[in-house]
Image (cartoon, rainbow, N blue to C red):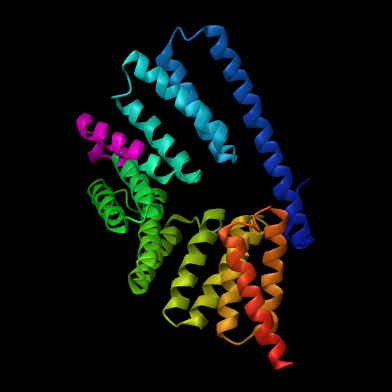
Amino acid sequence: TWARESDGPGFHVMNSTVSNHLQRWIVDTCCKMIDGDLRSRDERDPEADAARLLSVGRLLHQTGQTHAAKARLERGRELRQRCGTLDTAAGAALLRQIGIVAVALGMHEDAAVSLTQALRICERTGDVANVAGAGVLRSLGVAKSMTGDHDAALEAYGRARRIHERTNTLVSEDGVQLIANVGVTMMKKRQHAKAFRSFEEAERISERLGILSRPGHAGLLKNLGTACHELGDDEGAMVALSQARAVAERTSTLHTVNGASILMQIGRVMRGQRRFAEACTVCEEALRVRRATATLDTRGGQALRALLRDVRVFFAALR
């Protein structure tokens, strides 16, 4: 029996843990079955096997098994190269997923290479004019932005948006992700007003689609709040960040790395409002999440510790 929202935050953690273990068990079981089938078939149908490996790679990536996903996807690429089907729409889809996984592993240059190859295939097959092409362009934009080439990222995003507009698919979950990606890149370029407008547009589309209670929406609200804070609107920032926290609590994702990021941003805004005691409390909560997720030594964890030290100094000076 799943815990209810009224049972308290501890039960949200239990729900999330049980759900994650169950999902991972299902994926591991499927992967073993497919791996066994591939071995028994002795690669007699490499194109079908490559398609299966793409499906397995996606599942593994979705459950956080990124290195395992990369291994399956690379094997799929080898099979397609061997049978001469890499230069097809299916090959482009495989290369896109390889690029997405490479971004998750921090291999941003490698990701850009795979995604550029996928884009060239889409251009040759004509798929660059449809939603699949827009997806490749969006993923390429993410990879380019992660390498610091923000102008190239925005160019890719712009092409993807025009495709969505021509195909009347901008009001979609893909459209929301694309527009939010534009906002993130604008934040990196410190063009906060443009970033705010992008996040606001993504929020409006999310509302039209009725997807305000999904885990990913908490990240969009966090970005919207961060943009508000950078523009000097701490009141608006707290509204958006409070909503982000509420979504994360409802979806049992507050005690994750993304949840810690939301909590840290709330602490940062509270520091600007000189609410040092509350900022200490929320930053300490974020610190516990970082410890539980073994991410305290990451760049995000280090930034959190620096913020907490800063807040504690201000709080002590007022006592």
Q: Is residue 315 above or below residue 79?
A: below
Q: Is residue 28 above or below residue 147?
A: above
Question: Residue 124 at x, y = what percent?
Answer: 20, 30
Quarter holding the N terminus is top right
User: Residue at the location (47% across, 77% down)?
Assistant: 229
User: Residue at the location (51% across, 76% down)?
Assistant: 237
Q: Is residue 123 left or right of residue 77?
A: left
118 inside magenta stretch: yes
Q: Is residue 271 visible?
A: yes
User: Residue at the location (68% across, 52% down)?
Assistant: 294
Q: Nearer the viewer, residue 8 or 189?
A: 189
Q: Nearer the viewer, residue 58 or 99?
A: 99
Q: Quadrant of residue 12?
A: bottom right
* Residue closest to the far bottom: 318
275 inside magenta stretch: no
Question: Residue 302 at x, y = what percent?
Answer: 61, 64
Q: Is residue 214 visible?
A: no
State the predominant SS element of the stretch in magenta. Answer: helix
Task: Tally the numbered discs.
Answer: 0
Question: Residue 20 at x, y = what percent?
Answer: 68, 42
Question: Residue 158 at x, y = what percent?
Answer: 26, 54
Quarter holding the C terminus is bottom right
Q: Is residue 78 left or right of residue 157?
A: right
User: Residue at the location (43% across, 63% down)?
Assistant: 203
Q: Quadrant of residue 239?
A: bottom right
In the image, which residues are magenta? 113-132
Q: Is residue 73 left or right of residue 253?
A: left
